[in-house]
Structure formats: C-alpha cells, structure tokens
Image (cartoon, rainbow, N blue to C red):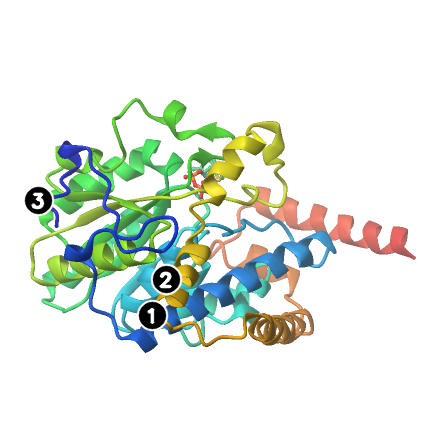
Amino acid sequence: MFKEFSPLKKKIFRIMDNNGKIKNEKWMPKIDNKNIVKAYKDMLFARTADLMTVNYQRQGRIFTYPPNYGQEAISGAVAQIISDEDWLVPAFRELGAWLAKGVSLKEIFLYYMGNEDASKFESAKNMVPFSVPIASQLLHATGIAYEVKLNNKKQTVFTFVGDGGTSEGDFHEALNFAGVWKVPVVFIVQNNQYGISTPTKVQTASESIAIKSVAYGVKGIQVDGNDFFAMYAAVKEAKDYTLAGNGPVLIEAVTYRKGAHTTSDDPTKYRTKEEEESWDKTDPLNRLRNYLKDNNLYDIDEEILIKDYKKETDRQFIAAETYKEYPIDDVFNFQYVDMPDDLKEQKREYKKFLKWKEKVAK
Ligand SMILES: Cc1ncc(C[n+]2csc(CCOP(=O)(O)OP(=O)(O)O)c2C)c(N)n1
C-alpha cells in the first residue's frame, strides 16, 4: 500500500465513493459484517455525544469545546484497530478514539468543566491526557515509542494532530527523531482544511501533508479521511508495519470540520455555504450508512438508537455535573513543589475574584 500510494505519486487512497459504493475492491479490508455495523454505531454514538456537547456549552454548562462533527471516520477506524496495550497520545479532536480506549463521557465532560480529575482516565489504559498546546503531543508520542522499541514491546503508539499542527517545530522534530530511530509511532494528521480560520493552502506551500514524511524517511500516505474503509485499511497497515519493526508511519487523513473550530468560533466569517455543501456530499456517516443499506446490513432503527445515545450522554453529563467540586487550590498546588511568588500572588488574586463573584451573584 505504501508503495502504490507513495505521497510522491500524488494519489489519494480511497476505497468507497461518496455514495457508499466500493470502487477499489483490491484494498477493501477484511472486516466481519458485525464489526462494520459496530463501527457505524460507534461513529453514530460519537456524533450524537459531540452534537450534544455543543448544546451543553450553549447552555453555559461547560467551557469551550472543539467539535468533531464530520471527522468521525478517522477516530472510528482507529477505534476498531487500537488495542488496550497500544498507546494513544491525543490532541483534542478525536472523541471516538478516546471512547475506544475506555475514556468515559463523564471524564470528557469533567475535562471541559475544568476539572483535572478527568485526566486520570480511570478505565483507559496507556493513554495520556488531551493536549491543547498544538503538536507538543507528537514529541511525547515519539518518546513513548522510543521506550517501546528499547524494551522490545509489541505496541504501537497512535498520535493525532491537525493540519495546522504540521507547521509547528515539534512536528518536524518528532518526525525526524521517529525516522532516525525507527520507532513504532503512527502520526495521524487530521487535515480538516483549516487551522481555526487559516485554510490548509495558506498553512503550507507543500504539495500535501503526507509528502512531508518523505524527507524524514518516514512512510506516508494520503487517505480520504471520510472513507471509513480506506481509513481502516491504512491504519491497519500502519499498525502492522510498526509492529514488524519497520518504523513510523504518517497518515494524512483528508476530511472537513463541519462544525466550528471551537464553540468560541464562527466559521461563517471565513468560509462559504457552497464550500460546506460540497463537503456535505462526503459525509462519513452517510457513506457508511449507504454501504450498509446496499449490502443488507442496515438493520438499525436509527431514531431509536439516537434516542438511547442521547439518554446515555445525558446520564453521563449529569454524573459529571454532580461530581464533587474541584478544589481551586489544586490548580495552583500541583504545578511546583515550592510555589513561586508570582503564582502565590495569582492564587490570592483568584480567591479575591471568586469572593467578588459570589457577592455579585447574591
Ligand atoms: C502551541 C499553540 N499555539 C497556538 C495555539 C492556539 N490554537 C488552538 S487550536 C489552533 C489551530 C489548530 O489547527 P489544526 O492543527 O489544523 O487543528 P484543528 O483545530 O483544525 O483540529 C491554534 C492555533 C495552541 N493551542 N497551541
């Protein structure tokens, strides 16, 4: 696959067209029908929870949230392939992969309520906290992969970043190190066409993001990120490749962020309706649903399913809302062994602010 779809050939790897028809039978991955249905349901769950989270934010019940809407096939594919033993080193926009690792919605909601208890991830093995400093996680992933290799462990490290993140120095340092040391890391670049309001074509003069892998001696491939089967095949191949000791892989997953960058953003300011509508035709859930229907696998009452998913999302949201309060002192206490003076000052100021807020609210 990596030879046939070398980034130098400027070909995108795609299996299923926008109507859910298989156009590239040669690369169709072997997946049990029941697992394809499961993948669809997982993606639908992620979409439902994601859309509801935006609503919670609009109700003022959580802080800023980065929607996943439109990008579900990427995490959906990783979710089917990543094992408990594999590592997940996340960014902040791959909800489906987190859930597959065992993170609960309750923890995700706690995180967006500013409660650091969330990052303990009680049931997710081999996963580190979300990373908002763009691309910093790629170095952590590479470091973890170095340890995996050093100790001859059979694990793959999966890490995520956006197209904007590939302009950060950390991206290049991580790829260089990973290539030199041939460590088992899979870099998944979610190219959703924008870094906030900056379009990818302004972000980089490179032919593609996948081609950046070539200079570092890293295998790379550009994949239709809204095609579940292509993503599945590429992620599976990448995992096998790393486990065989061949070194890292970079997957550029071409997708579209259908929602806002975060709940603080208004995409109508920088993109057109026509553009959004043209990407709507590539929606990952519609494509997979069409495939299921064409192959008599769609024995789902989607309305009932969504109702159940909403109930479950609400249940976990309430559990987060009623969770014990996070002591504000912890925000300051866990940063240094000995708290520096400027932080002590910030703590005093913050407490003063909270007191004032309480008084105003009365
Ligand atoms: C080091 C750093 N610089 C700037 C920011 C502010 N910031 C948050 S998201 C973002 C854009 C990220 O775009 P991209 O990497 O394409 O990922 P996407 O948000 O589209 O998933 C920026 C600049 C940050 N979080 N970290």
Q: Secondary structure at mark 2?
A: helix
Q: Marks 2 and 3, how far apart in space?
A: 28 Å
Nearest the eye: 217 or 209: 209
User: Which residue is under mark 1?
Assistant: 36
In the displayed structure, does residue 204 sit left or right of residue 360? Answer: left
Mark 2 is on which residue type?
A: Tyr
Image quarter of residue 128: bottom left
Q: Cβ–Cβ below 8 Å for labels 2 and 1?
A: yes
Report the mark closest to the observer, 2 or 3. Answer: 2
Q: Position of residue 54 (x, y in %)?
A: 63, 54
Nearest the eye: 5 or 171: 5
User: Which residue is under mark 3?
Assistant: 3
The numbered mark, 2 or 1, whose residue comes first in the sequence reads 1
Mark 1 is on which residue type?
A: Ile
Image quarter of residue 56: bottom right
Q: Position of residue 146 (x, y in %)?
A: 16, 55
Q: As displayed, is residue 149 above or below residue 160?
A: below
Q: Cβ–Cβ below 8 Å for labels 3 and 1?
A: no
Report the mark closest to the observer, 2 or 1. Answer: 2
Q: Position of residue 73 (x, y in %)?
A: 38, 56
Mark 3 is on which residue type?
A: Lys
The numbered mark, 3 or 1, whose residue comes first in the sequence reads 3
